[in-house]
Amino acid sequence: MKKAFKTLIYIFLSVWAVIVLFPFYWMILSSFKDYGSYNAEYIPKLYATNPTLSNYISSFSQVDLGRYFLNTFVFTIVTTVLMLVVSVLAAYAFSRLEFKGKNLVFTLFLALMMIPNELVIITNFVTITNMDMRNTFQGLILPSVTSVFFIYLLKENFEQIPEVLYKAAKIDGTSELGYLLKVMVPICQPTIITVVILKVIECWNSYVWPRLITDDAAYYLVSNGIQEIRENGFGRENIPAMMAAVVVISIPLIIVFLIFHKKIMEGVSRGGTKG
């Protein structure tokens, strides 16, 4: 009975995996189909009769996708580094330092997670516009350098470190910053790596804010590039070329996830476990 139940579970998971992965397979398959053959298929085929790379060439030649990749890379790296510095320092303050009103401040901080993202975007848009930072990297980056969720995740992880290590470090004359960098950060490395990876994915997939704050192609990200491909006509008509652009943009995230997916799972589980 137990073996039969396990078999059913595996069958269900296998079917579910096929359902989840099929859109990715169809995206990659369509990107290798010729424009003419794709439109000639009255019944879509699950294979490409005449595979071609012309769609990938078109996706780079029709729009400045190379520049958008560079902009996204700069935006992702700078935002992630600044967010990590802010989150680590804030989490350390909430987990180890004692100051008046700490619990109240942290509670109010967590309450920010209850505010709908649309309201935050409106506030950020007005602030960035008033500071004359539209169509700048500063305007793209600044609203994304703070994350309540990541601060909470790191705080919970920092609090799992035994207090005896902190007291021993203070006896040795280690400063607060030294204890953070030499003891807490190495111990919590899996969670910190998880935070970095999740932030990289978030930045790379960012769409609403870049579309709202930039209308200058010099500051477009890859998400803007996908929209431009659709709006300039060729992507709307040439679906295989559109799919090729999406595949190119997705490859970096797929590689990152495949390499570090175990670290993500480990970091999240460590951050949510006490003791």
Image (cartoon, helix red, strand yellow):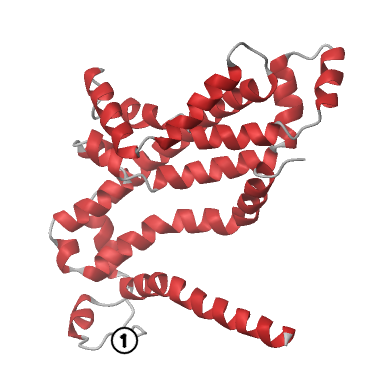
Can you see residue 220? no
Crowding at label 1, few (<14), some or many (≥20) Cα neighbours within 10 Å? few
Determine whether, in the image, residue 202 is placed left or right of residue 140: right
Tell which residue pokes out farthest to the left in this image. Answer: 233
Can you see residue 191? yes
Residue 149 in the image: x percent, y percent?
A: 52, 37
**Identity of the amino acid at label 1?**
Lys
**Image height check: is 37 above or below 146?**
below
Quadrant of the rendered image containing residue 197: top right
Could you tell me which residue is drawn at 24 percent across and 30 percent down?
135
Disc 1, SS: loop
Quadrant of the rendered image containing residue 248: bottom left
Determine whether, in the image, residue 41 is placed left or right of residue 83: left
Quarter occupied by the N terminus: bottom right
Residue 45 in the image: x percent, y percent?
A: 31, 86
In the image shown, does 228 or 90 lie closer to the viewer? 90
Could you tell me which residue is drawn at 29 percent across and 43 percent down?
208
Determine whether, in the image, residue 9 is placed left or right of residue 235: right
Could you tell me which residue is drawn at 19 percent across and 37 percent down?
215
**Image height check: is 110 above or below 27?**
above
Residue 164 in the image: x percent, y percent?
A: 85, 25
Quadrant of the rendered image containing residue 120: top left
**Image height check: is 253 above or below 159?**
below
Determine whether, in the image, residue 59 is placed left or right of residue 71: left
Residue 95 in the image: x percent, y percent?
A: 67, 25
In the image shown, does 64 or 232 lie closer to the viewer? 232
**Image height check: is 53 above or below 274?**
below
Quarter occupied by the C terminus: top right
In the image shown, does 218 or 128 lie closer to the viewer? 128
How many labels, in total? 1
Q: Which residue is mark 1?
A: 45
